Amino acid sequence: MPHDATVQTSMADAQHRVLEVLACRNDRDGLYPSTIGYCAFPGARFRTPQGAAFASARLRHDMEAKGVIVWRSNPRGYFITAAGRRALEVSPPASPLASKEAGGATAAMKA
């Protein structure tokens, strides 16, 4: 959990943020677990980088199980897979801001 308990992020939003960041990087620059924590929970205040890595553990595990990210040891870090790029193309972020920009389509579907 992020240190700031008032920050709440859905798993879908966090995964989308991580995939967006990974999609912008080249094949030589992976993300470390702590960096994924900072990307997934941008409003959180972590006491240490290890806290950010710990907070993102479940997220990383779920994303690896889905096959959208992969850990590589050389170069070291997490990288987006082809499945991750496809998932990013077909799933817009599930945030309230996105539903407002899309004319409320997401909000209307939930109602």
Image: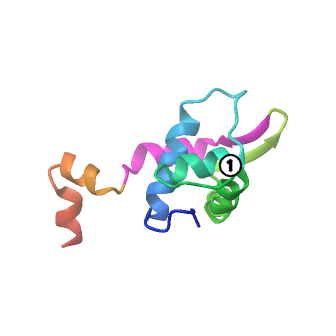
Horizontal and vertical percent position of residue 15: 52, 54
Specify the segment rendered in magenta.
76-93
Q: How is the image coloured?
A: rainbow
Task: Using the image, determine if residue 40 lies above or below residue 26.
Answer: below
Horizontal and vertical percent position of residue 22: 58, 38
Q: Amino acid at mark 1?
A: Ser
- Front position in the image: 17 or 34: 34
Say if the magenta span includes residue 78: yes
**Which residue, given by chain and number where applicable, does mark 1 sit on?**
34
**Quarter occupied by residue 74:** top right
Position of the C terminus by quadrant: bottom left
Say if the magenta span includes residue 30: no
Q: Write the residue at 49% across / 55% down.
A: 14
Q: Write the residue at 73% across / 27% down.
A: 28
Horizontal and vertical percent position of residue 40: 53, 52
Task: Using the image, determine if residue 29 lies above or below residue 104.
Answer: above
Q: Write the residue at 37% across / 51% down.
A: 93
Position of the N terminus by quadrant: bottom right
**Quarter occupied by residue 81:** top right
The residue carrying pointer 1 sits among few (fewer than 14), some (14 to 19) or many (20 or more) residues within 10 Å by Cα, namely: many
Q: Write the residue at 69% across / 61% down.
A: 54
- Front position in the image: 110 or 89: 110
Task: Using the image, determine if residue 61 lies above or below residue 36.
Answer: below
Task: Using the image, determine if residue 10 lies above or below residue 90.
Answer: below
Horizontal and vertical percent position of residue 76: 80, 37
Q: Residue furthest front?
A: 47
